[in-house]
Amino acid sequence: METWIFPNIALLWPTMARSLLQYRMMRLPAAQARAAERELKGAMWPWESAQTGVDCVQFPNPEGRIEIHISGDIPMAFRLYHQLTGDDGILSQSWDLLEQTCEFWVSRAAREPTTGNFTYLNVQPPDEMAGMVNNSVYTNAVASATLKFCLEAAQKLGKAPPPEWAQIAYNIYIPVVHNLYSGPVHPEYTGYHGQDINQADVALLQYPLEWPMDLQLAQNDLTYYQVRSSGPGTSGFYTGDSAYSIAWLRMNNRSAADAQFQLAFKHMDMDHFNVWMEKSFGDGGHLNFLTGAGGYIQNWLYGYIGARFQVVLWKAKKKLFSFFLLLSFSLLQNNALAFNPVLPPEMEQVTVRAFHYLDCTLTLAFNATLLDVHLDAGSSMYVVSGGGKHWTLLSHMGQQTVSLPPGQFYLTKTKARVARG
């Protein structure tokens, strides 16, 4: 839920998103009990849960015991909610959950012997066909991202986290190999040798995690793994494979993004109730497959619409006058929600109504030549375009709509301030 359903709800219905986070906070004792049963510290979150928070995965299916990346996916939902809403209260209210989840990651960590970095053993990656493996690159990355987010939350709240959080977060084992592809790629796990996978896995480093890597490595990961996931000749699953299209869009590679986007339509049961199918052939696997449907919607909102939280630095030119004219430059920094809208295949116009950022509700409409941003509700919001050159304030006391040429723009609440450091 947190990876493929929650991001859509957070952008469109933040009140509902908060209730989903509240569900997790209320079930912290059950997650702590799961960890204690396994002689681990903190909170180990269930793979499937309902009212009580007890894991509902039926034995002997291994997900509930070893697919521990769920304990990173949940804090990532809290991070996204905080980024989109600016609600600092969620950090204080969820601190027990965040702290206990970090303690789980610390108690579950092991040392990778060749590097001395931290890793996780005997886990199941998002690619569930892999079974139990060591050094799942996504599991390691989401553990690191969780610990880093919680370190930031601790600083904001005035907490003093244990030193192990930073030690693991900044010394996680993320290998790169050269024996799988013509260039470097991240191995899905130790021992992976190129077989088909049942869903996007390594691609999740780029979206939603936004794990830092150079452009060539990012392109190699997508090119190598996408043909082993839901494309022709594979096992035909579609679980989060929208990550490929979203990552290609963020590289401005439309042809690659569109090709992955089109695969989604093979998973729609158009003959019956128009529900999502897990697999593109045979019995379709699980029907009304919400994970795939949620990823498809994200392909629109976070891919073709291009919604993306960023800390943006704009270069500002200042004129200083003394005996002669001097020009100086400073960097202006602000939190912002970035957009880079492009039309999906065969679409002439797109409108996204009533999406939320901070305390504002807005509508975005665009075609091939024009882009409109309208303030529906809320106090005010700056629309920044032209790489930071043009700032338009939308408010109910003044201008409520701005028209822009197609391209990237940002929403930010306050005028940029000079970055320090």
Image (cartoon, rainbow, N blue to C red):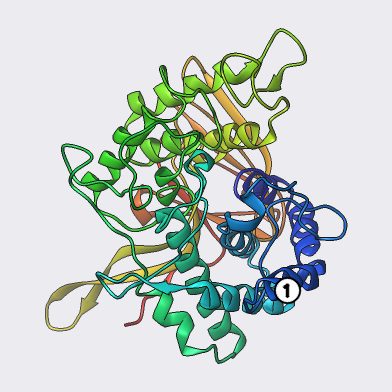
Extreme residue toward the front, this view: 60
Of residue 80 and residue 352, the one placed in the foreground of this image is: 80
Residue drawn at x 47%, y 66% is 145
Q: How crowded is mark 1: few (under 14 residues within 10 Å), some or many (20 or more)?
A: many
Residue at numbered disc 1: 32
Residue drawn at x 67%, y 54% is 64
Q: Is residue 211 visible?
A: yes
Q: Where is residue 352 in the image (x, y as percent from the top left)?
A: 63, 35
Q: Where is residue 308 in the image (x, y as percent from the top left)?
A: 49, 50
Q: Position of residue 136 (x, y in %)?
A: 42, 55
Of residue 167 and residue 23, the one placed in the foreground of this image is: 167
Q: Which amino acid does label 1 sit on?
A: Gln
Extreme residue toward the top, this view: 271
Residue drawn at x 40%, y 46% is 202
Residue 190, placed above or below residue 326: above
Of residue 363 and residue 186, the one placed in the foreground of this image is: 186
